[in-house]
Image (cartoon, rainbow, N blue to C red):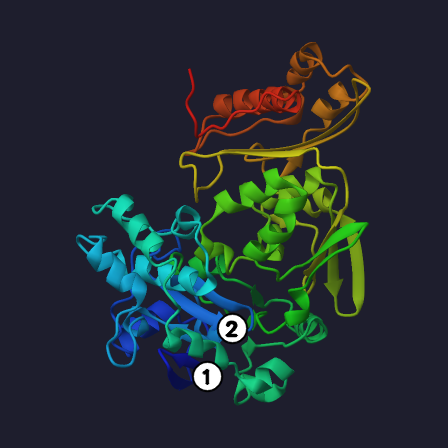
């Protein structure tokens, strides 16, 4: 199979490459571009950050969990290509020099490439844009100052030119966009219909969407993924529609796109999305992938359960729908048949009563110890409806049905909240692991219900602020 993309302004055509070869390994071992560093090799540290431009614009991505076939028809820029063709430094590079933003230098290429991408997009929320880049010696203050110094500087022409390289045949969805016929163990469908037909014929295949989870199967578990179906070409699975009655999310919508739609409607959920991964990960991770992997600590499912979302599945021409909480059967087991895939997620439009609380050892970009999502309706001082769901409290994302029952029909009061807290023992028997003890999980789950009550009553506070 032939993969064509732009690398630092030059067209590259690769043949007979492994479908699970990562961009990081290819850059360093085959191309000799060693500026892109390997740190964690799982998308957490940002040392391998590159900029990838596609029809949706410029994105910072982690090269360590980015497979080469995912780059077809796109433009890639590494730290070696941040500077111009005559050696002119990118504004981010110059600012890092001027403001002493580098010490040992190992993390610097990743920081610079995150800045290059955010600068191209005009993003100025630098703490968020750089949350996925870790530094162990310089300290973040001079790096943030360097990012701020680029805000009013024009985007270099050589960066802007990346937008002009999009394979025309890929935009038209033609077969030629895939190069020569791929090997039998690699499929690259271009539409949801083609995916449905392909996956029905190859139900044992591994689906690769953003590869933020599957990528670790290769880099950490050294698994051989065979056969593989890449979903990046299925643009009709990336659509997001908001109507008066529902929010419809295509399974391939990446999490930054989801956040842009969700945040104005359900701000607490939007803020959770900002925290649960880095910009690099959210630029690749998909809402469908986060659901389909069935993780008991996936952060989206509890919020979607609390919002009464519906999951839409497809197998060939057969489609079915279910409440999203019914999809999760047991640890590692979902109600999904071989050859069936997540197609869409729909959320009914509703008054925003949702609060999503994420507890983790780090505030940003960390796995949850407990995540609680509360959607409680109070009318005339009485609880009329409640949907409460948790991650990290059971083998699956799970509703707190006994807690809900203890609240519905009761006065909205501290007395009712205290009484409902005792029902948590009926809903959950959490485990003790490296992230938290069972006792901590139960106690904090109860406390989050009280926090919801206090905030619903108008007494809000930020956990990032200290007051006396």
Of the two numbered discs 2 and 1 in the rendering, the one whose residue sits closer to the viewer: 2
Total numbered circles:
2
How far from the left and from the top, in percent, is residue 370?
Answer: 53, 32
- Give the image quarter of residue 181: bottom right
Is 349 rendered above or below residue 389? below
Q: Is residue 128 visible?
A: yes
Camera-nearest residue between 24 and 424: 24
Residue at 45%, 67% (x, y): give it: 224
Residue at 60%, 81% (x, y): give it: 171
Camera-nearest residue between 269 and 300: 269
Residue at 40%, 55% (x, y): give it: 43
- In the rendered image, the residue lying farthest to the front is 152
Which sits earlier in the primary sequence, circle 2 or circle 1? 1
- In the rendered image, the residue lying farthest to the top is 415
Residue under numbered circle 2: 54
Q: CA distance from mark 2 to mark 1?
A: 13 Å
Question: Secondary structure under badge 1?
Answer: strand
Specify the quadrant that holds the C terminus: top left
Left or right of 388? Residue 231 is left
Question: Secondary structure under badge 2?
Answer: strand
Left or right of 86? Residue 274 is right
Residue at 67%, 19% (x, y): give it: 423
Q: Which mark is residue 4?
A: 1
How far from the left and from the top, in percent, is residue 78?
Answer: 33, 70
Q: Residues at badges 2 and 1 in contact (C-beta under 8 Å)?
A: no
């Amino acid at each position: 199979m032939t993969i064509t993309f732009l690398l630092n302004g030059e067209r590259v055509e690769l043949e007979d490459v492994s479908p699970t070869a990562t961009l990081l390994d290819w850059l360093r071992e085959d191309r000799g571009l060693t500026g892109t560093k390997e740190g964690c090799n799982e998308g957490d540290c940002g040392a391998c950050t590159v900029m990838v431009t596609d029809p949706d614009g410029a994105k910072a991505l982690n090269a360590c969990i980015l497979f080469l076939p995912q780059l077809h028809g796109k433009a890639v820029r590494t730290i070696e290509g941040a500077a111009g063709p005559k050696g002119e430094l990118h504004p981010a590079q110059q600012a890092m020099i001027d403001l002493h933003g580098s010490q040992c230098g190992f993390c610097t290429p990743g920081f610079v490439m995150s800045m290059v991408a955010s600068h191209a997009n005009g993003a100025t929320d630098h703490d968020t844009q750089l949350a996925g880049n870790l530094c162990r010696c310089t300290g973040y203050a001079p790096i943030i100052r360097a990012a701020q110094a680029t805000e009013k500087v024009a985007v270099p022409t050589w960066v802007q030119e990346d937008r002009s390289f999009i394979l025309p045949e890929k935009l038209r969805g033609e077969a030629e966009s895939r190069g020569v016929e791929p090997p039998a163990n690699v499929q690259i469908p271009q539409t949801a219909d083609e995916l449905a037909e392909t996956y029905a014929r190859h139900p044992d295949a591994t689906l690769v969407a953003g590869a933020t989870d599957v990528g670790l199967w290769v880099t950490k578990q050294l698994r051989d993924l065979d056969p593989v179906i890449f979903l990046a070409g299925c643009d009709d699975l990336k659509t997001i529609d908001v109507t008066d009655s529902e929010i419809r999310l295509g399974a391939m919508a990446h999490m930054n796109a989801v956040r842009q739609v969700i945040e104005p409607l359900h701000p607490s959920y939007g803020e959770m999305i900002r925290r649960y991964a880095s910009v690099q990960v959210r630029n690749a991770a998909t809402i469908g992938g986060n659901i389909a992997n069935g993780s008991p600590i996936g952060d989206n499912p509890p919020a979607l359960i609390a919002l009464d979302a519906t999951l839409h599945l497809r197998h060939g021409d057969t489609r079915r729908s279910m409440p999203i909480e019914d999809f999760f059967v047991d640890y590692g087991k979902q109600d999904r048949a071989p050859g069936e895939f997540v197609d869409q997620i729909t959320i009914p439009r509703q008054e925003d009563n949702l609060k999503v609380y994420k507890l983790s050892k780090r505030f940003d970009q960390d796995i949850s110890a407990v995540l609680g999502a509360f959607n409680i309706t109070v009318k005339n001082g009485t609880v009329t409806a409640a949907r409460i769901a948790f991650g990290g409290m059971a083998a699956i994302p799970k509703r707190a049905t006994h807690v809900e029952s203890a609240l519905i029909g009761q006065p909205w009061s501290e007395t009712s909240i205290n009484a409902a807290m005792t029902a948590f023992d009926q809903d959950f028997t959490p485990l003790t692991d490296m992230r938290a003890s069972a006792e901590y999980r139960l106690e904090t789950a109860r406390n989050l219900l009280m926090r919801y009550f206090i905030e619903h009553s108008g007494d809000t506070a930020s956990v990032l602020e200290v007051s006396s």
